[in-house]
Amino acid sequence: MSEYIVCQKAFDAAESGEAWQGDDDVKRNGSNAWSNSNIREWLNSSSKTVKFTTKAPTKSAVLYYNAYVDEPGFLSNFTRTERNMINAVSHEGIKDKVFLMSVDEINTYLGTTDDARIRKLKDGTACNYWTRTPFPTDPNMVRDVDFGGGFILNIYSSFAFLGDGGVLPALNIKSDIFNSGKGTFNDPKKLD
């Protein structure tokens, strides 16, 4: 998992192409389906131009800011060698090299206390961040780790098209390439 929230982006754009417009929740507010979400496609793309399979995250289709339709894919900043070091993992039958953690993974790997869940942008600002877990009763709501009044962190739900959600990418690196380190924060795995 990234040490920092790497950016803020919408999980998925309003499928109508216009925020708050359309005749159903997904058209108005985006979809909570990880499988074809804009954020999943951006995280797993190594192209300079991401091919979005649903409505692209344009300025008019995300709320607040951070349209990313014209940004290169997240993996475009990785070399071919670095991309080959990543093990693809399966979520709901879909292979991902880069993913957002689920609520269960957040609880398992980070814990359930406020201090354990706090994640910050590179500038040191604490920020809400997305999970890949859908809210079960609303197709336009995604579970996130949210500040509920001060620094009380709750697993909450937000509209998928909100552009201020933090992106905390995770990936699974092939373990046989490391020569040393325990894999902890204080003693990370290393390629000596």
Image: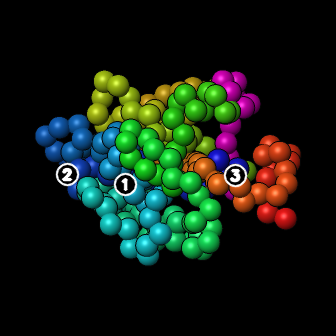
Identify the secondary structure beneath mark 1. Answer: helix
Name the chief secondary structure element in magenta: loop
Quarter of the figure with residue 110: top right
- Would you call the spot at circle 2 few (<14 residues within 10 Å), some (14-19), or many (20 or more)? many
User: Where does label 1 land, which residue?
Assistant: 38
Left or right: 154, with 54 as reference point: right
Q: Position of residue 159 (x, y in %)?
A: 37, 38
The stretch drawn in magenta includes residue 116:
yes
Look at mark 2 in the image and give the residue it sits on.
16
Mark earlier in primary sequence (2, 3): 2
Q: Residue at x 38, y 38 (%)?
A: 92
Which amino acid, mark 2?
Ser
Give the residues drawn in magenta, as a range: 111-122
Question: Which residue is found at the position 72% from the left and 60% from the top?
Answer: 177
Query: Considering the image in quadrants, where does the C terminus appear?
Result: bottom right
Q: Nearer the viewer, mark 1 or mark 2?
A: 1
Mark 1 → mark 3, Cα distance in angstroms: 29 Å
Q: Kindly identify the amino acid type of the residue bearing the numbered disc 1.
A: Asn
**Label 3 residue SS:** helix
Task: Give the distance between the C-alpha atoms of the residues marked 2 and 3, in whole angstroms.
Answer: 43 Å
The image quarter in which residue 136 lies: top left
Q: Position of residue 104 (x, y in %)?
A: 55, 28
Q: Nearer the viewer, residue 46 or 61?
A: 46
Residue 16 at what x, y percent from top left? 19, 51
Q: Position of residue 10 (x, y in %)?
A: 42, 50
Task: Between residue 189 and residue 112, name the one nearer to us.
Answer: 189
The furthest residue to the left: 23
The residue under label 3 is 175
- Nearest to the observer: residue 130 or residue 92: 92
